[in-house]
Amino acid sequence: MKSADQMDSEEPGGVRMTAQHPHENEPYWRSSISRVDPEKVFIRGYDLEDLIGGVSFTSASFLLIRGRLPSPRESRVLDAVLTAVLDYALEKPGTAAARYVVSANPSMVAGLAAATMAVGKYTLATEDTARFIVAAHADFLESGEALETFAANLAESMAARKERIPGLGHPVFKKVDPRAAILRETAVREGLWNGPALLYEAIHRAFTARPGKADIPINDVGAMAAVLVALGFTPEESTGLAVISTLPGVVAHISEELAHGKPLRIIPGESVAYDVEAGKDFKADWKEAGWTPAS
């Protein structure tokens, strides 16, 4: 059987033609992030030696991801994001996962990997909220409606479809998540609480105006998403930055576990209800299932 390439490269008369691949001379990879020369490393075109000690880790992260140097206000706001969720004790699934893994495999890298793998839809990941904010703002600009009207209509339609507004609610904080509040204050002070963030707030106001919803705050993930969208990061990049922000706390927990933790942690028996019947007759049930009894 001829391959697709062979069929594409033959004329009806059977004459073999040279296959044309428009990208055959293209490099396998292209990257504009960094370059390594025999004596230099360049980060987005800048000599790394100028960056070391010359810019903060926050500003360097902005440069790497956005591809340009941040303004002072952008750096201050991103720095606030990167300190907003440093740690959340043992109530964060990723931290607990890291400590469990390290108790069995005493490795900093294994623990960091476990904590990172725990990031997702229900904890820390900002991308769903960021996508919602970006999409809602685009729809708002096309709608021609007033801000509050659009927000009320969107909240109403989502409630009718039983769709969750991402970035709202917290198991502990009511009305206000203090971390979200200070992130907002910082962004407002630096002039970076912009149109998409204002719309998100309006949607939250419309949502909390509904019966039984008054205590539900914009949570830390919601505020981080709004701020990172304002800074120009993509939804996926926002989750990456959220992960980076929590890693110092994870490192501290892993270090504590390595130094003082219990080898091979298990879930305490008193914390589990085992619905397992004891004393079943294996031979009788095996025979009833159609098998010949074992000799």
Image (tube, grey):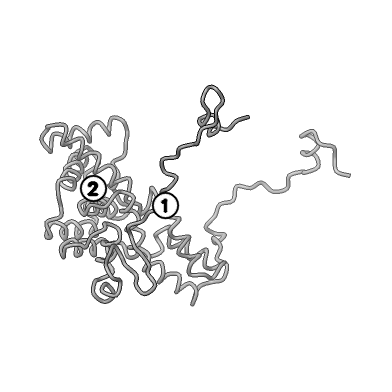
Q: x, y (%) of residue 98?
A: 47, 63
Q: Quadrant of the C terminus?
A: top right
Mark count: 2
Q: Nearer the viewer, residue 198 or 244?
A: 244
Q: Nearer the viewer, residue 128 or 268?
A: 128
Q: x, y (%) of residue 33?
A: 33, 59
Q: x, y (%) of residue 226?
A: 23, 50
Q: Nearer the viewer, residue 74 or 210?
A: 74
Please identify the quarter of the rendering in which residue 154 is found.
Answer: top left
Question: Dot 1, how many residues are within 10 Å of its Cα: few (below 14), some (14-19), or many (20+)?
Answer: few
Residue in view at x 52 percent, y 57 percent: 271
The residue labelled by disc 2 is 215
Residue type at numbered disc 2: Asp
User: In the image, 93: left or right of 275?
Assistant: left
The residue labelled by disc 1 is 27
Q: Nearer the viewer, residue 102 or 40?
A: 40
Residue in view at x 32 percent, y 63 percent: 245
Q: Secondary structure at mark 1?
A: loop
Residue type at numbered disc 1: Pro
As displayed, is residue 221 above or below residue 265?
above
Q: Residue furthest right?
A: 295
Name the mark nearer the viewer: 1 or 2. 1
Residue in view at x 21 percent, y 63 percent: 69
